[in-house]
Image: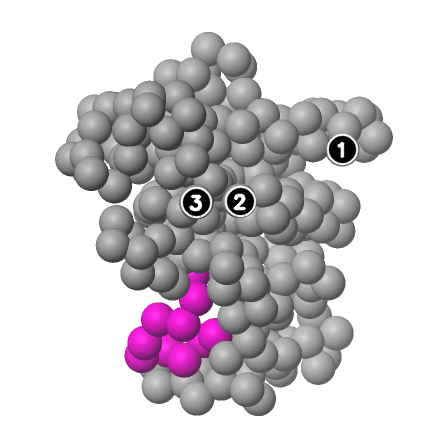
């Protein structure tokens, strides 16, 4: 309510933390339902889950309440998705269940083949999961736009089989023998994320047409000179008009 009668025009509200959500979800895993399985050692996390549990028990959805009040005082309301899908990273103990626990074969790999606790967007199943989460949120809440938080999670593609095989087909070399700054590898990684962005834009057009008004798409990136290193070919996204704001 502090933004009533101010020059602020939009509120951005996080709804997901990878595969975890702060609202009851059929796609992701709501933090409140996960509490019983967690050995939470971070006190701020525990307080967050307890607060969400209390609100849910009273039939209050914080996202819906914030959205409706924002609209009442003339603010637009966007939701933000954390694009990195993390697995079991201490000390939180967040992932005794979850997307990567159930699908460990979709993890990123380091050069030496070590599995990392991050999902790889080189796999269609990872892209589809995130698209399903976006669809659920847009259909569930009367939002004005979505914000893809690419700064939350990088990187998004490592040395998984799809990447290695695609690179060999295109360049005839094993990318695991190359420097991490090889521009060809960066562009190939970026191709997976650009493909995903096209799918998001297509999904939002479908949902916008159904709703009768445009749902805007925004992305959070890095400095221009470092975006490609993280797989973000934002120049292509802009040229293809995939974004409404950046």
Real-space CA distance between mark 3 and mark 1, rounded to the nearest whole angstrom: 33 Å
- Number of numbered discs overlaid on the protein picture: 3
Q: Where residue 163 appears, x then y in whole percent?
A: 41, 37
Mark in front: 2 vs 1? 2
- x and y percentages locating residue 144 in the rendered image: 64, 36
Look at the magenta stretch and give its main secondary structure. Answer: loop
User: Could you tell me residue 231's position as x and y percent?
Assistant: 35, 33
Question: Which residue lies most toward the top here?
Answer: 239
Identified at 53% across, 44% down, the residue is: 123
Question: Which residue, given by chain and number where applicable, does mark 1 sit on?
Answer: 207
Question: Which residue occupies 33% across, 24% down?
Answer: 172
The quadrant the C terminus occupies is top left
Q: Nearer the viewer, residue 146 or 74?
A: 146
Q: Nearer the viewer, residue 49 or 188?
A: 188
| Residue annotated with mark 2 | 123
Q: Tell which circle, 2 or 1, labels the residue nearer the N-terminal end.
A: 2
Mark nearer the viewer, 3 or 1: 3
* Rendered image: mark on residue 17: none
For this view, does 95 lie left or right of residue 110? right
User: Of helix, strand and loop, which one carries label 1?
Assistant: helix
């Amino acid at each position: 309510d502090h933004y009533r009668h101010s020059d602020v025009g939009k509120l951005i509200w996080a709804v997901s933390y990878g595969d975890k959500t702060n609202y009851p979800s059929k796609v992701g895993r709501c933090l409140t339902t996960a509490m019983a399985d967690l050995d939470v050692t971070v006190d701020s996390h525990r307080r967050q889950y307890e607060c969400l549990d209390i609100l849910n028990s009273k039939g209050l959805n914080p996202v819906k309440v914030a959205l409706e009040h924002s609209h009442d005082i003339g603010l637009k309301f966007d939701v933000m998705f954390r694009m990195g899908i993390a697995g079991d990273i201490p000390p939180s103990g967040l992932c005794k269940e979850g997307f990567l626990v159930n699908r460990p074969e979709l993890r990123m790999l380091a050069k030496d083949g070590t599995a990392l606790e991050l999902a790889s967007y080189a796999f269609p199943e990872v892209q589809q999961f995130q698209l399903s989460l976006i669809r659920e949120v847009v259909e569930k809440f009367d939002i004005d736009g979505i914000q893809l938080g690419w700064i939350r999670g990088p990187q998004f593609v490592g040395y998984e089989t799809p990447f290695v095989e695609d690179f060999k087909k295109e360049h005839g070399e094993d990318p695991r023998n190359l420097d991490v700054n090889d521009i060809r590898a960066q562009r190939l990684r970026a191709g997976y994320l650009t493909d995903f962005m096209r799918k998001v834009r297509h999904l939002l057009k479908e949902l916008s047409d159904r709703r009768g008004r445009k749902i805007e798409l925004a992305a959070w990136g890095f400095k221009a000179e470092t975006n490609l290193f993280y797989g973000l070919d934002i120049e292509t996204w802009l040229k293809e008009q995939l974004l409404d704001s950046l």
